[in-house]
Image (tube, helix red, strand yellow):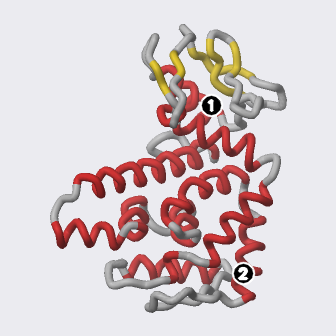
Amino acid sequence: MAQFRKRFWKQVTVGPVGGGGLSGPLLDGRPVKLPAGELLAVTSPVLAEALAEEWRQIAEGAQFTPDDLALTRIAGSHIERVLPDRASMEDALHAYGIDDNLCYQSAAQDEGVVARIRAWAAEQGLHPAMTEGLMPLTQPEAYGTALKQYLSALEPATLAALGVMVPITGSLLLPLALVHDVISFDEAVHLAHADEYRQLEQWGHDKELATLLEKRNADIADALRFLHLAQGRKPNS
């Protein structure tokens, strides 16, 4: 259960944090301390400003949880999990890649979008086996090796964003295609949840399922926004 906290600060600004050209939100002039004790500090000025805006948007005296601070939460994972031990994140993502949902084809999937992802993956030297069956698929050893090499070359911020997207989609290839602008956000979420959207079309509105999909899609959008800001992209650019 998320622990509620109450806004205690009056002013949020952006300033240098921890040296080394890093900056971050300052609450009444003090940097934010993350759960493991590290300071919330990033290299991208636009990300620092976006993080500060999250803290500004908490109303005075209001209670809040980490769910209200999506960018802060992802930045915290980047700082306290990925940077000190990226190998663990790479291993977790690799496991999803070896049993990738995208490799289990279904009639609900958009074949054109899948084909575009596969063509892009092949350009990266990634050639996964695909199946139309339900039995577990064993990937070639060469694919597992190529996937490890590919993950090892990614920027830490990309790994942090994938750490959010991959468990939601059950796929590594699909989020990789999204973060590299191979597919659009709408194409990504409709492909990731193709069976669920087909169910809604066939059986009508299911409030619980629709709410679940909305939450998942919002989390993917937050991770993508974090990555774009970390890369220095301005909002809506």
Q: Residue 123 has which mark? A: none
Q: Secondary structure at mark 1?
A: helix
> Which x, y percent locates residue 133?
45, 91
Task: Tell me if 204 is positioned left or right of 16 in this view.
Answer: left
- According to the picture, the residue beneath numbered tag 2 turns out to be 144
Q: Earlier in the sequence, mark 2 or mark 1?
A: 1
Image quarter for residue 94?
bottom right
Q: Kindly identify the residue that appears in the image at 67 percent across and 50 percent down.
A: 157
Q: Kindly identify the residue that appears in the image at 56 percent across and 11 percent down.
A: 8
Question: Which class describes the residues within 10 Å of circle 2: few (<14), some (14-19), or many (20+)?
Answer: some
| Placement of 81 over or under 132, stated as above or below | above
> Which x, y percent locates residue 72?
59, 35
- According to the picture, the residue beneath numbered tag 1 turns out to be 48
Which of these two is toward me, 168 or 188? 168
Separation (CA) of disc 2 from disc 1: 36 Å
Query: Which is closer to the viewer, label 2 or label 1?
Result: 2
The three-letter code of the residue at mark 2 reads: Gly
Question: Which class describes the residues within 10 Å of circle 1: few (<14), some (14-19), or many (20+)?
Answer: many
Q: Residue furthest front?
A: 1
Image quarter for residue 32?
top right
The three-letter code of the residue at mark 1 reads: Ala
Q: Secondary structure at mark 2?
A: helix
| Placement of 2 over or under 99, stated as above or below | above
**CB under 8 Å between discs 2 and 1:** no
| Placement of 77 over or under 18, stated as above or below | below
> Which x, y percent locates residue 35?
69, 32
Q: Kindly identify the residue that appears in the image at 72 percent across and 55 percent down.
A: 155
